[in-house]
Image (spheres, rainbow, N blue to C red):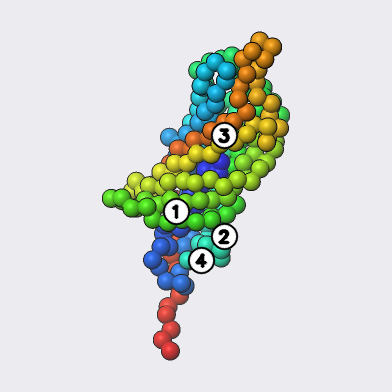
Amino acid sequence: MKLLLIIGLFLGSISIIGQSNDSVSFLDFNLLSKSTIEFRGTSTINTFYFSSASLKGNGAFIINNNLDDSTYYADISVYVKSFDSGSKMLNSDMYEALKYDKYPTINFKLVKINNIEKSGGSKQNFNANITGVLTVAGKSNNMKIDFNIRELSDSTFYLKGNKSISMRDFNVDPPSKLFGLIQVADTLNINFNLYVELKKSYFYSTPMIMK
Protein backbone atom coordinates (compact mmCIF):
# COMPACT_ATOMS: atom_id res chain seq x y z
CA MET A 1 0.00 0.00 0.00
CA LYS A 2 1.43 -2.64 5.29
CA LEU A 3 1.59 -0.19 2.07
CA LEU A 4 0.74 0.50 3.12
CA LEU A 5 -0.65 1.52 3.98
CA ILE A 6 0.91 -1.19 5.05
CA ILE A 7 0.84 -0.20 7.66
CA GLY A 8 1.07 0.69 11.37
CA LEU A 9 4.44 2.36 10.98
CA PHE A 10 3.31 5.31 13.04
CA LEU A 11 2.52 3.26 16.14
CA GLY A 12 6.14 2.75 17.01
CA SER A 13 7.07 6.29 16.15
CA ILE A 14 4.32 7.78 18.27
CA SER A 15 5.16 5.62 21.25
CA ILE A 16 8.76 6.76 21.40
CA ILE A 17 8.35 10.50 21.05
CA GLY A 18 9.77 12.20 24.11
CA GLN A 19 11.47 9.09 25.49
CA SER A 20 15.15 8.72 26.30
CA ASN A 21 17.81 7.79 23.77
CA ASP A 22 18.10 4.35 25.40
CA SER A 23 14.42 3.39 24.99
CA VAL A 24 13.15 0.62 22.73
CA SER A 25 9.52 -0.18 21.85
CA PHE A 26 8.27 -3.61 20.70
CA LEU A 27 4.97 -3.46 18.78
CA ASP A 28 2.60 -5.71 16.84
CA PHE A 29 -0.51 -4.53 15.02
CA ASN A 30 -3.47 -5.70 12.95
CA LEU A 31 -5.45 -3.89 10.28
CA LEU A 32 -9.12 -3.54 11.31
CA SER A 33 -11.96 -4.72 9.05
CA LYS A 34 -13.37 -1.22 8.44
CA SER A 35 -10.20 -0.22 6.57
CA THR A 36 -10.67 0.57 2.87
CA ILE A 37 -8.64 1.28 -0.24
CA GLU A 38 -10.17 3.18 -3.14
CA PHE A 39 -8.96 3.72 -6.69
CA ARG A 40 -10.30 6.81 -8.45
CA GLY A 41 -9.89 7.19 -12.19
CA THR A 42 -11.32 9.00 -15.18
CA SER A 43 -12.38 8.03 -18.67
CA THR A 44 -13.51 9.92 -21.74
CA ILE A 45 -17.08 9.83 -20.38
CA ASN A 46 -16.93 9.91 -16.55
CA THR A 47 -15.08 9.61 -13.25
CA PHE A 48 -15.18 6.18 -11.63
CA TYR A 49 -14.33 4.68 -8.25
CA PHE A 50 -13.19 1.19 -7.28
CA SER A 51 -13.25 0.46 -3.56
CA SER A 52 -12.51 -2.54 -1.37
CA ALA A 53 -12.90 -3.26 2.34
CA SER A 54 -11.35 -6.74 2.06
CA LEU A 55 -7.89 -5.77 3.25
CA LYS A 56 -5.45 -7.85 5.24
CA GLY A 57 -2.56 -6.27 7.07
CA ASN A 58 -0.16 -6.86 9.94
CA GLY A 59 3.30 -5.95 11.08
CA ALA A 60 5.88 -5.89 13.84
CA PHE A 61 8.30 -3.22 14.98
CA ILE A 62 11.36 -2.88 17.19
CA ILE A 63 11.78 0.86 17.34
CA ASN A 64 14.47 3.08 18.83
CA ASN A 65 14.33 6.85 19.13
CA ASN A 66 16.47 6.99 15.99
CA LEU A 67 14.30 5.64 13.15
CA ASP A 68 17.41 4.67 11.18
CA ASP A 69 18.30 2.17 13.92
CA SER A 70 14.79 0.69 14.05
CA THR A 71 13.57 -2.59 12.60
CA TYR A 72 10.05 -2.79 11.23
CA TYR A 73 7.86 -4.90 9.00
CA ALA A 74 4.41 -4.09 7.61
CA ASP A 75 2.42 -5.67 4.82
CA ILE A 76 -1.02 -4.94 3.34
CA SER A 77 -2.74 -7.05 0.70
CA VAL A 78 -6.10 -6.84 -1.05
CA TYR A 79 -7.75 -9.15 -3.59
CA VAL A 80 -8.24 -7.54 -6.99
CA LYS A 81 -11.73 -9.03 -7.35
CA SER A 82 -12.81 -7.48 -4.05
CA PHE A 83 -12.78 -4.03 -5.71
CA ASP A 84 -16.20 -2.86 -6.86
CA SER A 85 -17.18 0.14 -8.98
CA GLY A 86 -20.92 -0.55 -9.02
CA SER A 87 -20.68 -1.53 -12.70
CA LYS A 88 -20.22 -5.21 -13.58
CA MET A 89 -18.87 -4.30 -17.03
CA LEU A 90 -16.30 -1.86 -15.66
CA ASN A 91 -15.35 -4.31 -12.91
CA SER A 92 -14.71 -7.03 -15.48
CA ASP A 93 -12.60 -4.72 -17.66
CA MET A 94 -10.45 -3.59 -14.74
CA TYR A 95 -10.00 -7.12 -13.36
CA GLU A 96 -8.77 -8.21 -16.77
CA ALA A 97 -6.46 -5.19 -17.13
CA LEU A 98 -4.96 -5.94 -13.69
CA LYS A 99 -4.35 -9.58 -14.74
CA TYR A 100 -6.20 -10.93 -11.72
CA ASP A 101 -6.08 -14.54 -12.98
CA LYS A 102 -2.29 -14.55 -12.69
CA TYR A 103 -1.87 -11.92 -9.95
CA PRO A 104 -4.94 -12.10 -7.67
CA THR A 105 -3.71 -9.59 -5.06
CA ILE A 106 -2.34 -6.07 -4.86
CA ASN A 107 0.33 -5.73 -2.17
CA PHE A 108 2.09 -2.96 -0.32
CA LYS A 109 5.18 -3.44 1.87
CA LEU A 110 6.78 -0.84 4.11
CA VAL A 111 10.43 -0.12 3.31
CA LYS A 112 11.34 2.97 5.32
CA ILE A 113 9.86 5.62 7.60
CA ASN A 114 11.29 8.84 6.17
CA ASN A 115 9.77 11.37 8.52
CA ILE A 116 7.08 11.78 11.16
CA GLU A 117 6.05 14.96 12.97
CA LYS A 118 3.26 16.16 15.23
CA SER A 119 0.49 18.12 13.49
CA GLY A 120 -1.55 19.21 16.53
CA GLY A 121 -5.20 18.70 17.46
CA SER A 122 -7.12 17.63 20.56
CA LYS A 123 -5.65 14.13 20.38
CA GLN A 124 -2.30 13.00 19.01
CA ASN A 125 -2.16 13.83 15.31
CA PHE A 126 0.86 13.29 13.10
CA ASN A 127 1.99 13.69 9.51
CA ALA A 128 4.27 10.99 8.16
CA ASN A 129 6.13 10.20 4.96
CA ILE A 130 7.09 6.63 4.17
CA THR A 131 8.70 4.65 1.37
CA GLY A 132 7.10 1.39 0.35
CA VAL A 133 6.86 -1.13 -2.47
CA LEU A 134 3.54 -1.35 -4.31
CA THR A 135 2.99 -4.49 -6.37
CA VAL A 136 0.25 -4.43 -9.02
CA ALA A 137 -0.22 -7.08 -11.71
CA GLY A 138 3.08 -8.67 -10.69
CA LYS A 139 5.09 -5.46 -11.17
CA SER A 140 6.69 -3.81 -8.11
CA ASN A 141 7.61 -0.13 -7.81
CA ASN A 142 9.05 1.91 -4.95
CA MET A 143 7.13 5.03 -3.98
CA LYS A 144 6.85 7.65 -1.26
CA ILE A 145 3.46 8.31 0.33
CA ASP A 146 2.29 11.01 2.76
CA PHE A 147 -0.14 10.08 5.54
CA ASN A 148 -2.09 11.89 8.20
CA ILE A 149 -2.31 9.86 11.42
CA ARG A 150 -4.96 10.35 14.10
CA GLU A 151 -5.14 8.62 17.47
CA LEU A 152 -8.66 7.28 18.13
CA SER A 153 -7.88 5.58 21.44
CA ASP A 154 -4.90 4.25 23.37
CA SER A 155 -4.74 1.25 21.02
CA THR A 156 -6.38 2.31 17.73
CA PHE A 157 -5.23 4.74 15.05
CA TYR A 158 -6.60 6.07 11.76
CA LEU A 159 -4.25 6.48 8.80
CA LYS A 160 -5.32 8.50 5.76
CA GLY A 161 -3.19 8.93 2.65
CA ASN A 162 -3.30 9.12 -1.11
CA LYS A 163 -1.00 8.55 -4.04
CA SER A 164 -1.34 8.93 -7.81
CA ILE A 165 0.09 6.16 -9.97
CA SER A 166 0.45 5.45 -13.66
CA MET A 167 -1.04 2.13 -14.74
CA ARG A 168 1.63 1.80 -17.42
CA ASP A 169 4.32 1.96 -14.73
CA PHE A 170 2.93 -1.43 -13.66
CA ASN A 171 2.68 -2.77 -17.22
CA VAL A 172 -1.10 -2.36 -17.11
CA ASP A 173 -2.87 -1.15 -20.26
CA PRO A 174 -5.80 1.16 -19.42
CA PRO A 175 -9.08 -0.46 -20.57
CA SER A 176 -10.80 0.86 -23.69
CA LYS A 177 -14.14 0.15 -25.38
CA LEU A 178 -15.86 0.83 -28.70
CA PHE A 179 -12.61 0.81 -30.67
CA GLY A 180 -11.03 3.36 -28.38
CA LEU A 181 -13.96 5.81 -28.24
CA ILE A 182 -14.24 5.11 -24.50
CA GLN A 183 -10.77 5.21 -22.99
CA VAL A 184 -9.71 5.00 -19.33
CA ALA A 185 -6.98 7.51 -18.41
CA ASP A 186 -3.59 6.13 -17.41
CA THR A 187 -3.52 7.83 -13.99
CA LEU A 188 -5.22 6.31 -10.95
CA ASN A 189 -5.45 7.99 -7.55
CA ILE A 190 -5.22 5.60 -4.57
CA ASN A 191 -6.95 6.65 -1.35
CA PHE A 192 -5.99 4.79 1.84
CA ASN A 193 -8.35 4.76 4.84
CA LEU A 194 -6.67 2.44 7.31
CA TYR A 195 -7.67 1.62 10.88
CA VAL A 196 -4.98 -0.07 12.94
CA GLU A 197 -5.20 -1.72 16.34
CA LEU A 198 -2.16 -2.20 18.55
CA LYS A 199 -1.95 -5.84 19.64
CA LYS A 200 1.01 -5.74 22.00
CA SER A 201 3.32 -3.09 23.37
CA TYR A 202 6.55 -3.61 25.26
CA PHE A 203 8.85 -0.85 26.41
CA TYR A 204 12.43 -1.15 27.58
CA SER A 205 14.59 1.67 28.86
CA THR A 206 18.19 1.30 29.95
CA PRO A 207 18.77 2.89 33.40
CA MET A 208 20.71 6.12 33.20
CA ILE A 209 24.22 5.83 34.67
CA MET A 210 25.40 8.95 36.49
CA LYS A 211 29.02 9.89 35.88
Q: Amino acid at mark 4?
A: Asn
Q: Secondary structure at mark 4?
A: loop
Q: Tally the marks.
A: 4
- Can residue 200 be seen here? The reply is no
Whether 3 is drawn above or below 124: the answer is above
Q: Which residue is mark 1?
A: 11
Please, is residue 187 above or below residue 5 in the view? above
Which residue in the structure is indicated by mark 3? 78
Q: Earlier in the sequence, mark 4 or mark 2?
A: 4
- Mark 3: few, some, or many residues within 10 Å (few <14, many ≥20)? many
The residue under the point 43% across, 89% down is: 211
Q: Amino acid at mark 2?
A: Thr
Estimate the x, y position of residue 23 in percent, counting from the top left.
Answer: 45, 69
Eye-nearest disc, 1 or 4? 4
Mark 4, mark 2: which one is toward the viewer?
4
Label whose residue precedes the other's in the sequence (3 or 2):
2
Q: Quadrant of residue 143?
A: top right
Per the image, the residue denoted by label 4 is 66
Residue at the left extreme of this rendering: 122
